Image (spheres, grey):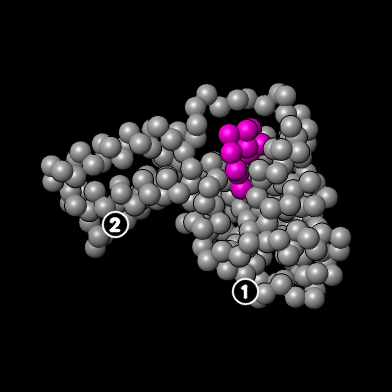
Amino acid sequence: MSAELLSRIRVVLSRTTHPGNIGAAARAMKTMGISSLYLVSPKKPIDAEAEARASGAVDVLHGARVCASLTEALQGTVYALAVSARRRELAYVSAAAHSAAQALVAAAQAGEVALVFGTEMSGLTNEEILQCSAAAHIPAEPGYSSLNLAAAVQVLAYEARVAALAGQSLPVAEAAPARHEDVENLYIHLEQSLLASGFLDPANPKRLMPRLRRLFGRARLEQEEVNILRGMLNSFDKNT
């Protein structure tokens, strides 16, 4: 069962600057039994340095799927964990890596899940974090919390492996969680309905949609709940 859970975890690297870091991340993944790598708009293609730093994990490296957006990289997932060292005003409450990895692996019982990492210099954007289901941080020394990208991947991959090996103690979801693309379509529909009703002013949107994303993100929507909300919006749309 642990191998099956690990096979459902994809590591997503967004806008990675240095190919060597992608290779090192692939090596970190393989040592923990994770092989699914997704690259969102990498700044440079995989090169000889990436292959050298991947060492015996060249298969993971060359099996990586390159995506144009985080939305594309998360398609088909039921849970995504954003890994970030920085506090964000409109982000989720960040959990430490150990407990966050347990939640990730528990969600993997229901389908594909993702560990999401941002660019080396600035990490994930607020918008990227709000596309995820939850946020995590590595509880490093506060005075020097900077970690190399591959090192961060190694820590989360290790914690995920530990959680998967202890899979018998994981909580089981009561209902099917919503897929990422279905939740994203809900947000699109919701924004359109709010615009049509006049509640959302396109000239002055403020932070309404990010706040709604955070609200529904905390709720961990189930597929049936998404269907109900889309049905409600369709009903409201007919009366506007």
Magenta stretch: residue 192 in it? no
Q: Point out residue 146 in the picture as x, y percentages from the top left corner.
A: 72, 58
Farthest residue toward the left?
239
Examine the rendered structure and indicate whether residue 15 appears above or below residue 95: below
Residue tagged 2: 205
The residue depicted at 61 percent of the width and 48 percent of the height is 114
| First to last magenta residue range | 103-114
Q: Point out residue 235 in the picture as x, y percentages from the top left corner.
A: 20, 38
Q: Point out residue 195 in the picture as x, y percentages from the top left corner.
A: 22, 53
Q: Is residue 158 visible in this depiction of the protein?
A: yes
The residue depicted at 42 percent of the width and 45 percent of the height is 182
Residue type at mark 2 is Pro
Front in this rendered view, residue 62 or 82: 62
Residue tagged 1: 43
Front in this rendered view, residue 237 or 62: 62
Q: Earlier in the sequence, mark 2 or mark 1?
A: 1
Task: Tally the numbered discs.
Answer: 2
